[in-house]
Image (cartoon, grey):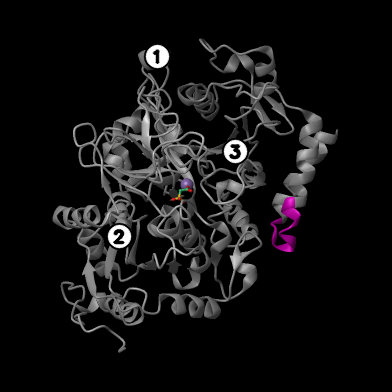
Amino acid sequence: MNAISKDVDRTDIAKGSDGSRLAKLNEWVAEVAALTRPDRIQWCDGSDAENDALIAQMLDDGTLVKLNEQTHPNSYLHRSDPDDVARVEHLTFVCTSDQDDAGPNNHWMAPTEAHAKMDALFEGCMAGRTMYVIPYCMGPIDSPLSRCGVEITDSPYVVANMRIMTRMGAPALARIEKEGAFVKGLHSTGELDPDRRFIMHFPEELAIKSFGSGYGGNALLGKKCHALRIASHQARNEGWLAEHMLILGIENPQGETHYIAAAFPSACGKTNLAMLIPPEGYRSAGWKVWTVGDDICWMRPGQDGRLYAINPEAGFFGVAPGTSEKSNPNALACLQRDAIFTNVGVTADNQPWWEGLDDGQQPAIDWRGEPYDPAKRPAAHPNSRFTVSAKACPSYSPEAENPAGVPISAIVFGGRRASLVPLVFEARDWTHGVLVGASMGSETTAAATGAVGVMRRDPMAMKPFCGYNFADYFAHWLSFDTPGAKLPKIFHVNWFRKGDDGKFLWPGFGDNIRVLEWMIGRVKGTAPAVDTPIGALPAIEGINLDGVELSSEAREKLFGYDRGGWASEFEAISDYLGEYGPRMPQRLSEEAERTASALQA
Ligand code: SAT
Ligand code: MN
């Protein structure tokens, strides 16, 4: 067969205002079409008409199932291939010319080998299919902090999701035409064969090639692939940070709002924290939490020395199970209409349903489309998701669209730790804070394939997402500590500490505002703390626990620290940091030694 199938109109190109600034994009699209040989090429403009037609087509071919129009207008369910339900970290590669630049934290393949491998998979893979070209912008369309990309995909489900998750279509294309630069993302679902599935990143070329999966993080290339792996690499070269963090604003009764960025691994409650509704006592006193983002944060120093952050995304791709009127009423409010659900169950009258929804209804059909049988499997896959526009969120911050970003007062790191780690502590300074982030550990979740509940080091919650060597990444973090910098305070939290009975000791959810209030008190210099070798713990009178019932075991484990346990923890942390060899910044190793010897003293 010829380089291009007969139906493809070679003049099907993006028509910019003068034509020339889009030449690079048009050339790449033609090259991809020649390789993948689609029947049709469709340039996505992001219009309602385009989306309506795609939805109609997906309802027609069974990619989507329409949900109950009365209860959930304009909402759809997608059931993925049962072998394609999560990120695949073992099949995700960072392809830098020098292997050391990818680091021990990434799987690596030489770029030429990776291109050859991927191009062989992409060869002719879109025959009989439509190739969609999606120009998108990560971040507010008029923000200097935003960056553009173009995803080419053969999946209409990806187009519909990218439309919610990014600023997609005509305005993004106009920005690309103005700037000339964009990240190239090529995606095909292929045959959804796990043995022919790879997610490859080429940070030096600002390019991504993803084959064989239709699942969120593997297929919506603007998200983890671009906004974290490629962007972290770009950010290092350009002096900013691309992080796996939610961003929230906390407004106190005086009407001041402080912004907090918080890193937690996937499926550890970022969405819930970002949308927190304070308990009644706080609400009536005038506290309010504003949502800027729930997953990704790009930040850079502003003229005043503070860090300013934007949420590069335009929507939420949240974990459904556990989302309820009690745990996250704001998320439930978002999900009343215009949402895409992936791998949830449905009730007899076709409403979406998942474990922990607690709405008194019962599931009839499970996520695989079979009659619900609790002996067989849960109704919703543990990593089932919703995709919804951020604008639908009742707590969506008006500042989220501010092109200048929001100034960050505090950075929070947190993992899922059943033992040892107290509820909250504060780092002594920036260097110690970077160490606290670098030594984060967390128990694995269903967001990635593999065992769940295994403790692993997940520095800054970026283990699956840092596009370069962690040692260089820590050095980059340290480099922000310059004269004149007004850096945020850094904290560590653990909402997941368990008691001897195996139950969580901290109520979490809305009550987490008590911890945020203490942090803001620390930023303002008003909240008391007790210094320890691991950092500053809240003085018990410094944290508002009115209305929270805590056993003496809970008080001790949440607000105390176990010197012997932490001494062993630091041995493990030193071993971990040692794996990065001489590239590890000395400042960080010294900081770890300082803490370790203070624990021995
Ligand atoms: O699947 S995603 O990577 O998009 C979500 C997550 O795992 O954080
Ligand atoms: Mn995430």
Quarter-of-image position of residue 359: top left
Q: Label 3 vs label 2: CA separation?
A: 32 Å
Q: Is residue 528 visible?
A: yes
- Number of numbered discs visible in the structure rendering: 3
Q: Which residues are magenta?
A: 576-585
Q: Is residue 584 above or below residue 43?
A: above
Looking at this rendering, what residue extends furthest in the right direction? Answer: 601
Residue 439 appears anywhere in the view: no
Q: Is residue 440 left or right of residue 6?
A: right
Q: Nearer the viewer, residue 399 or 81?
A: 81
Could you tell me which secondary element the residue under label 3 belongs to?
Answer: loop
According to the picture, the residue beneath numbered tag 3 turns out to be 415
Marks 1 and 3, how far apart at CA = 27 Å
Q: Position of residue 257 (x, y in %)?
A: 38, 30
Are there few (<14), some (14-19), or many (20+) residues within 10 Å of tag 1?
few
Q: Amino acid at mark 3?
A: Gly
Q: Is residue 212 above or below residue 215?
A: below
Cβ(mark 3) to ligand 2 < 8 Å?
A: no
Whether 236 is drawn above or below 520: the answer is below
Q: Earlier in the sequence, mark 2 or mark 1?
A: 2
| Image quarter in which the N terminus is found | bottom left
Horizontal and vertical percent position of residue 187: 38, 66
Q: Is 472 above or below relative to 549?
A: below
The residue to which callout 2 is attached is 136
Kindly check if marks 2 and 1 are in contact, taking CB atoms under 8 A apart as contact.
no
Point out which mark residue 280 bears: 1
